[in-house]
Image: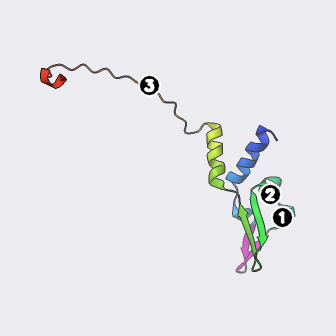
Amino acid sequence: MNEESILNALQAIAFSDYTNYIWIEDGQVRVKDTRLLTDSQRSAIAGIKDTGKGVELKLHDKQKALELLVKYLGFFEHPEEESTVRVELSGIPEDWAE
């Protein structure tokens, strides 16, 4: 496993969409044959199980994958800038300085 494969997996998860795996036809939910899925699509799947009443498809956490990608790519990072403001005041009563 290398950096590129990790980034590809995170992208697959972050941009996954349930419509790549299921569709509705005549009021019934249909599941795509997993043999027809791309490697990227398969890597986004956290689990598939037969519930007895149908199939449950769970994808990996998109939000977490996006957060990791954003962090890796350095988006939204703002280096803390040190700033100094010098203010000279005049005409202040002496008793205020105490």
Q: CA distance from mark 2 to mark 1?
A: 8 Å
Q: Residues within 10 Å of mark 2 (few under 14, many from 20)?
A: some
Q: Residues within 10 Å of mark 3 (few under 14, many from 20)?
A: few
Q: Earlier in the sequence, mark 2 or mark 1?
A: 1
Vertical comparison of 24 with 38: above or below = below
Residue pointed to by mark 2: 42
Which residue is most to the front?
98
Tag 1 secondary structure: helix
User: Type of residue at label 2?
Assistant: Arg
Q: Which residues are magenta?
A: 22-31
Q: Are marks 2 and 3 in contact (CB under 8 Å)?
A: no
Quarter assignment of residue 71: top right
Q: Earlier in the sequence, mark 3 or mark 1?
A: 1
- Residue 98 in the image, given as x and y percentages of width and height: 18, 23
Residue at the spot x=76%, y=77% of the render?
A: 54
- Residue 40 in the image, given as x and y percentages of width and height: 79, 53
Residue closest to the eye, 48 or 36: 48
User: Type of residue at label 3?
Assistant: Glu
Can residue 51 be seen in this snapshot? yes
Residue at the spot x=76%, y=63% of the render?
A: 47
Vertical comparison of 31 with 20: above or below = below
User: Type of residue at label 1?
Assistant: Thr
Q: Residues within 10 Å of mark 1 (few under 14, many from 20)?
A: few
Q: Are marks 2 and 1 in contact (CB under 8 Å)?
A: yes
Instruction: Please indicate whether residue 49 sits to the left or right of residue 72 in the image.
Output: right
Specify the label residue 82 is tagged with.
3
**The magenta stretch spans residue 93:** no
Can residue 93 be seen in this snapshot? no
Residue pointed to by mark 1: 34
Front of the two marks 2 and 3: 3
- Residue 19 in the image, given as x and y percentages of width and height: 71, 64
Tag 2 secondary structure: helix
